[in-house]
Image (spheres, rainbow, N blue to C red):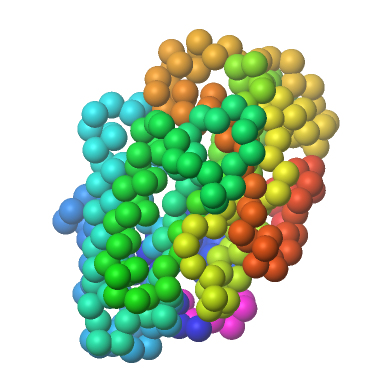
Amino acid sequence: MQIAITGCSGLVGSALVEYLVNQGHTVHCIQRNKSTDGLIFDPNRIENLNADGSGVDAVIHLAGENISTGRWNAKKKKKIIRSRVQGTHEIASFFSTLPHPPKVMLFASAVGYYGDRNNEKLTEKSSLGSSFLADVCKQWEEAAVPAQESGIRTVFTRFGMVLSPHGGALHKMLPAFNMGVGGKIGNGQQYMSWISIRDLVAAIEHLLLHEELSGAFNLVAPAPVTNEEFTKTLGRCLQRHTPFPVPAFIVRLLFGEMGKELLLASSRVFPERLLESGYTFRYIALKDALTHCIDGS
């Protein structure tokens, strides 16, 4: 396939580009417009795109403001919403009006769509949550309406926590855990829905290639774990003790609303539709996924 991608230089984007090229696809990177704070794409800077859109079979939109850096003040929240909602609308509108639009457009979203739900089992059929992130995800997905209305097959991928040896949340955790000062966050009973980077990129290709698939898909491993389970498993993989819990009030004090939603909220999400579509996970056991990341292979 000829595939155009935004966010090629990010953690997911760089891994996805490498994977797709190795699978025999051709990738065109969509650059962002620096004059708009790098938030909105520039249709004049899409590598090798023909004026009528021919030559591009699929578009993957990954770009967006990093939600895990800095406190969520009013300015940061506005930037998060704008980068996702306006950026998605720009991409969807541009490609849907071309004489030869792509056959499929895939938009990255997140399991934050479901909000904080304790130990409730969540699938693509579950209702929208009530939080800032849930509202962002709702607006994010709705911004792709131009693509849907034009008849383009539209897919929404709700990412869980991506485990990668090259960056992301795990990369930030490893120094503390390697020094033996890691520990659970809060009471440790909040669920974490995770996915290995290898499964993430393979699942995205699976969704592109299967023409009968559209709508929302949870991109998470079918084995969510509590934060306490995650902590103990990571400690065992590193052969380190994990005796230093981080109290919930410290998380709220240091990170505010961002800490509450990203570190203390519970999301027990399952990839029901992805499994039904025939996708086979490479990593189902957290220990295996973490071992891969720690080895860096």
Q: Quadrant of residue 253?
A: top left
x and y, in percent, of residue 84 in the image? 32, 50
Q: Is residue 231 visible?
A: no
Position of 207 with respect to 77 (left or right) is right
x and y, in percent, of residue 142 in the image? 32, 54
Instruction: Between residue 170 and residue 95, name the one nearer to us.
Output: 95
What is the magenta range?
A: 20-27
At 25% from the left edge and 82% from the top edge, which residue is drawn? 98
Q: Farthest residue toward the left?
A: 35
At 58% from the left edge and 12% from the top edge, which residue is drawn? 247
Tell me if residue 56 comes above or below residue 188 in the rendering.
below
x and y, in percent, of residue 236 in the image? 82, 32
Tell me if residue 159 comes above or below residue 200 in the rendering.
above
x and y, in percent, of residue 17 in the image? 51, 69
Quarter of the image for the C terminus: give it.
bottom right
Whether residue 110 appears in magenta in the rendering, the answer is no
Instruction: Between residue 218 and residue 127, name the one nearer to us.
Output: 127
At 51% from the left edge and 30% from the top edge, which residue is drawn? 116
Position of 39 with respect to 218 (left or right) is left
Tell me if residue 135 comes above or below residue 98 in the rendering.
above
